Image: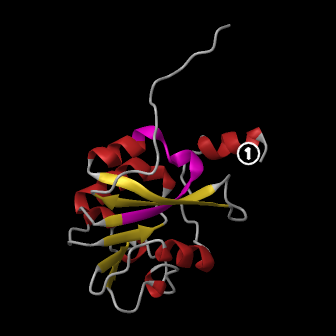
Amino acid sequence: MNSNISHNIKKRIKANDVFITPLEVAKQQIQLHNINDNDLWLDPCRNNKEGSYFNNFPQNVKKDWCEILEGKDFFEYNKNTDIICGNPPYSVMDKWIKKTLQLNPKEFSLLIGIGNLTTRRIEIIENAGYGLSKMKMLKIYDWYGMSCIVVFEKNKKSIIEYDRKVYKTKT
């Protein structure tokens, strides 16, 4: 992608965060979770009745969904949930992570652009008691850059180390 397109995406005034997750990718993301009978799974942005995630959650689990276009806003959701699995809108990533942590699931996963997996965000999630337990990088046609599925589990040691120090080169 050339730099003009990248710049236009980053500087757009109106976010366009509706990107339907390919069914094969949603299934891969779901399989990265620990599946236990009777867990409550949440699809935080189902997007349509054919929900790539919601309709493919394991059969033996309880499931719920949110979809702002249908009057069920994730930011107003307050039920206890065990697993949150979905593709969040990138324009509200920090707010999304904060809401996810408030719901205190056993584990959650995000399908995000690799550039959205920042050390600051990982640190916020780790400070809430979650470790990055699984990560899978993939490329989705027509999406900007590389994407990754990240799974965070409560009380789990992270598989990634990071350093937030800013290093400078000698000039």
Residue at 59% over, 79% down: 23
Which residue bears the numbered disc 1? 5
- 111 in the magenta segment: yes
Q: Secondary structure at mark 1?
A: helix
Check the image and report above or below for 79 versus 8.
below
- 82 in the magenta segment: no
Can you give x and y, in whole percent of width and height, for residue 167 in the image? Answer: 54, 20
Can you give x and y, in whole percent of width and height, for residue 83 in the image? Answer: 33, 71
- Number of callouts: 1
Q: Nearer the viewer, residue 49 or 59?
A: 59
Check the image and report above or below for 121 versus 171.
below
User: Which residue is situated farthest in the bottom direction here?
Assistant: 59
User: Which residue is situated farthest in the top direction here?
Assistant: 171
Can you give x and y, in whole percent of width and height, for residue 61 in the image? Answer: 33, 87
Quarter of the view holding residue 76: bottom left
Residue at 63% over, 14% down: 169
Q: Work out whether residue 44 can be spotted.
A: no
Q: Callout 1: 10 Å neighbours few (<14), some, many (20+)? A: few
Kind of residue sitting beneath label 1: Ile
Q: Work out whether residue 26 can be spotted.
A: yes
Left or right: 152 as drawn, with respect to 166: left
Q: Nearer the viewer, residue 59 or 68?
A: 59
Write the start and end of the magenta stretch as one range: 108-120
Q: How is the image coloured?
A: secondary structure
Can you give x and y, in whole percent of width and height, for residue 37 in the image? Answer: 30, 87
Q: Quadrant of the C terminus?
A: top right
Residue at 33% over, 83% down: 63
